[in-house]
Amino acid sequence: MSDPLGAASGQQFGRRLLLLVDAKGYGASGPIRQREFQEAIPRLVEAAAHAAGLRYSDWETQAQGDALFAVLPEGTSEPALVDTFMRALEAGLRNYNESRLPQAWLRLRATVHYGPASRGDLGFVGPGPVELARLNASDGLKAALAQAPDAHLAVGVSEPIYVDVIRPGYTTLRPGRFWRVEAVEKEYRGAVWIWVPNASGHPKETPSPPALSPSPRTSGYPEPSSRGSMVNTANDNSVIYATQHGDQHIQVADGR
């Protein structure tokens, strides 16, 4: 039987759709709450997958305490994962947290990327899983969830997912509901496009960036656009988001 992701030696090459969900504040929680989160995360992810018409039983998953990493089968619908799945996951989190105090909420960061992944002796290896982890751990995605205390989920997608799937309109998500933040984590430098579903503490809709010519998946990322202008937006909490050269700068207005 063929093994498209390679055996433990990792000799074969394959690109897959990758997902990582990670819990906010897990380390500061006590053992009882940590155990509850560990039980809830895979259950909520599986329920969201079923709601999106995705076969969770075909996913290759790797639990990491407060996180769940998944390699999805070839041919998985990218629009279904970034749209229907994320909406269902956010709804599941809201339902889960409904009877809990805010400080005991399970709040997740979820990131999606498409990239090389193969099996190693201790899990999946390759640029894809590494980049996915860097995007999930980026300051921008963490800040997005922290600055929206009523939010249950913050979603981050890599540049190729935004350019190839979201911006062309293959989902019901409006591209202007995403904002781009530079992701600098350890040796990695890239960008993450962020969306916080059903939260008041996020930027209002901003114009999409200039069109890029999407490169084939095998040729890497499109070159980032060179934008010299600065676009300022403000949310209802007087948080000012300034975007220049594709980077986001956040300032809290002192006018309350």
Image (cartoon, grey):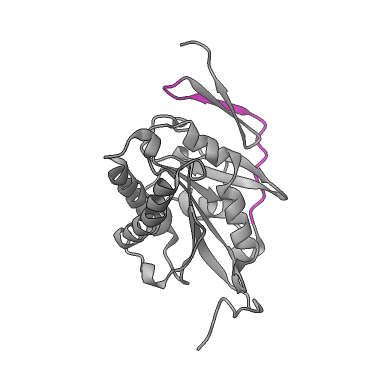
Q: Nearer the viewer, residue 72 or 243?
A: 72
The residue that appears at 51% across and 25% down in the rendered structure is 233
> Horizontal placement of 84 versus 6: left or right?
left
- What secondary structure characterizes most of the magenta part? loop
Q: Position of residue 203 (x, y in %)?
A: 47, 30
Is residue 233 a member of the stretch shown in magenta? Answer: yes
Residue drawn at x 66%, y 35% is: 245
Give coordinates of residue 48: x percent, y percent. 34, 57
Query: Can you give x and y, in whole percent of width and height, for residue 68 in the image?
Result: 47, 58
Instruction: Examine the image and state in which quarter residue 183 appears.
Output: top right
Is residue 34 shown left or right of residue 211? left
Can you give x and y, in whole percent of width and height, for residue 229 in the image?
64, 29
Q: Is residue 213 visible?
A: no
Is 153 located above or below residue 213 in the figure? above
- 251 up-or-down from 3: above or below: above
User: Residue 95, can we see it?
Assistant: yes
Q: Is residue 177 magenta?
A: no
Range shown magenta: 221-237
Seen at 46% across and 71% down, the residue is 73
66 vs 231, nearest the viewer: 66
